[in-house]
Amino acid sequence: MTQPATARSARLRRAGTGTGATLALAAVAVTATGGAAHADERYTVRSGDTVSHIATRTGSTVTAISRANNLADASRIRIGQVLTIPSATTTTATTAAAPAAASTAAAPAAGTHAVRSGETVSAIAKRYGTSVQAVVAANGLDARAFIRAGQVLTIPGTATSTGTASVTTAAAPSAATTSATHTVVAGDTAGAIAKRYGTSVQAIITANGLNSRALIRIGQTLSIPGATAGTTPTTTAPTTQLVGNTFEGRTYPATVVASANANKATLLTVGVPTKAEMRTLVADTARTMGVDPALALAVAFQESGFNHASVSPANAIGTMQVIPSSGEWASQLVGRQLNLLDPTDNVVAGVAILRSLIKTSPDLPTAIAGYYQGASSVRRHGMFADTRRYVANVQTHMTRFA
């Protein structure tokens, strides 16, 4: 019978990465807003893609892509699959508010901007009065909105005339809105915060210089522009205790346990793939990333039994039981931000860590031990007794999946 990652596993892997805990956001929590209307496009799924990443990259939404491709489960796409990306639809709010001005203000001219060292897309978008997603879409940037010094960006929705400036100032907030601040607590997402304060995800992204995925972290203080007057933040932890606070005799800090409960609640709310589906995903991802599928399957089985809804008191998340700090390390390994609640990203994170450990360890048992105990700890102290049992179990499981 398998268990979630042990206390020592989570603790030492956290210490090994040396990065701060980061709140993992659900893949469906934030979807991009549509840009200008355009014809339907085709997109071929690549390794590591998720529907949410594709939606952000193409300026569509998870819901629209799922509907256009009859996806019963947005978390289940495969490498090589060709998706239809539906055209974005324009809203009628602007036309209804100012029909007389629509013909002259609907399509302001595009400008250009040469990127300087230290600049971000969010800062540039704020400077020109446009949105991160609009800049991403206009320049074909990836989901991370990566830019480089010297790059010349097309800035949509900008113009040099004073007419455009007047359109911008005309959209000033009404007396019923104000600015507020919010301290991020476990379980928060940009989408939920925007809904609570009566504002938009894009407004929060722009005001706080967030990346296109609206990643936030516990304890971060956000500026909330356009908050509806009278709203107050909700800072209560989840009322249902889905995850305990102790494991293997160790009691975890309240903040860690709160995050674990929030992540567990999110997984149960959005739903997870079946164990059979996760087993297939682990094997396919391992093959794509050049890792022995039998090893990845054995680790996943030992860690969670292929149950993606598994979350430990140490906040080890999902099928591969990866804690947020290890997820940050895995994100650096693969070159993009990984969402540990997303089934695909979770498996990519675990397999990326295994791949790195295999490259840097003298033999396979040591690599397996590093996944459980932490590579630096194994080098300093050798394998602990429970680590040796873990390694033996994984190697036994490998014979089942060979």
Image (cartoon, rainbow, N blue to C red):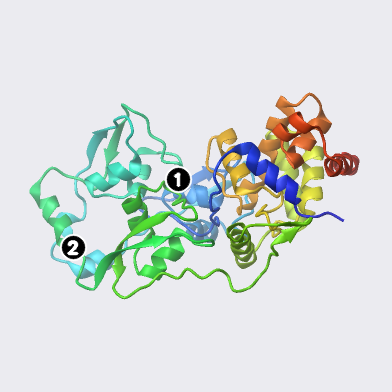
- Left of 12 or right of it: where is 137? left
Q: 204 or 22, which lies in front?
A: 22
Foreground mark, 1 or 2, reads 2
Disc 1 marks a residue whose amino acid type is Arg
Q: State the count of labels.
A: 2
Q: Residue at x 64, y 46 (%)?
A: 78
Residue 86 in percent (x, y) is at 45, 54
- Residue wearing tag 1: 57
Disc 1 residue crowd, few under 14, some 14–19, many 20+, Cα 10 Å: many
Residue 103 in percent (x, y) is at 16, 58
- The earlier-in-sequence mark between 1 and 2 is 1
Q: Residue at x 33, y 45 (%)?
A: 122
Question: Residue 172's mark?
Answer: 2
Evaluate whether residue 358 shows in this view.
Answer: yes
Q: 326 or 63, which lies in front?
A: 326
Q: Secondary structure at mark 1?
A: helix
Q: Secondary structure at mark 2?
A: loop
Residue placed furthest toward the bottom: 230
Asked which quadrant contains residue 285, the reply is top right
Q: Residue at x 10, y 45 (%)?
A: 161
Q: Residue at x 68, y 34 (%)?
A: 289
Q: 344 or 206, which lies in front?
A: 206
- Left of 298 or right of it: where is 219? left
Marks 1 and 2, Cα distance to the nearest angstrom?
29 Å
Disc 2 marks a residue whose amino acid type is Ala
Question: Residue 274's mark?
Answer: none
Residue 52 in percent (x, y) is at 52, 52
Residue 373 in percent (x, y) is at 75, 40
> The N terminus lies in which quarter of the figure?
bottom right
